[in-house]
Amino acid sequence: MVAARTLTRTAPERLQAMRSGSSTTPRETATQQRLTRRQQGAMACVVAALIALFPQAMVPAILTARGEDEVRVWFLAMYAPTGWRWTVISARIVLALGLLLSARRLHDGVDHRPAR
């Protein structure tokens, strides 16, 4: 009985949804919203910063501090000569912080370009 009443009440919308693939009252969910270019740029900066910081800076720093010179895998700093490893690790940390700062500025919509 309840199902029959519900079907009677919502039949036109359900039929429209089956025909067109969308309902007459479109509801936009969070996954259906399009990201702006600034948001896409901010997300790309965060992803690149996390890659530069953790697997390219922190892990090689721990390996170098422990004296494990044989482990190289895909850590850029581990392929550098022994004297340059901490320089490469520091550069990756600075790169990650710069990318996170850029992501923050993109997200907040701040434009720090000089005025013409």
Image (cartoon, rainbow, N blue to C red):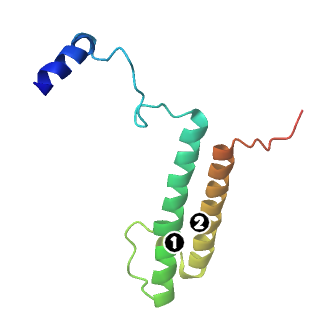
Question: Residue farthest to the right?
Answer: 116
Marks 1 and 2: in contact by CB < 8 Å? yes
Judge whether 98 appears above or below 42 on screen: below
- Seen in the picture, residue 52 relative to 116 is either above or below; the reply is below
**Quarter in which the C terminus is drawn:** top right
Q: Residues within 10 Å of mark 1 (few under 14, many from 20)?
A: many
The quarter of the picture where residue 22 lies is: top left
Res 65 visible: yes
Give the residue displayed 53% in from the left and 66% down from the top. 53
Disc on res. 12: none
- Quadrant assignment, res 109: top right
Q: Residue at x 17, y 20 (%)?
A: 5
**Which of the two labelled residues, at mark 2 and mark 1, occupies the earlier sequence position?**
1
Residue that label 2 marks:
92
Q: Position of residue 105 (x, y in %)?
A: 69, 48
Q: State the image coordinates of residue 93 (x, y, percent, origin top left).
A: 61, 68
Asked if residue 18 shows in the view, the reply is no
Q: List the residue tagged with mark 1.
A: 77
Instruction: Tell me which amino acid carries mark 1.
Output: Ala
What is the distance, in whole Å, between disc 2 and disc 1 at their CAs? 9 Å
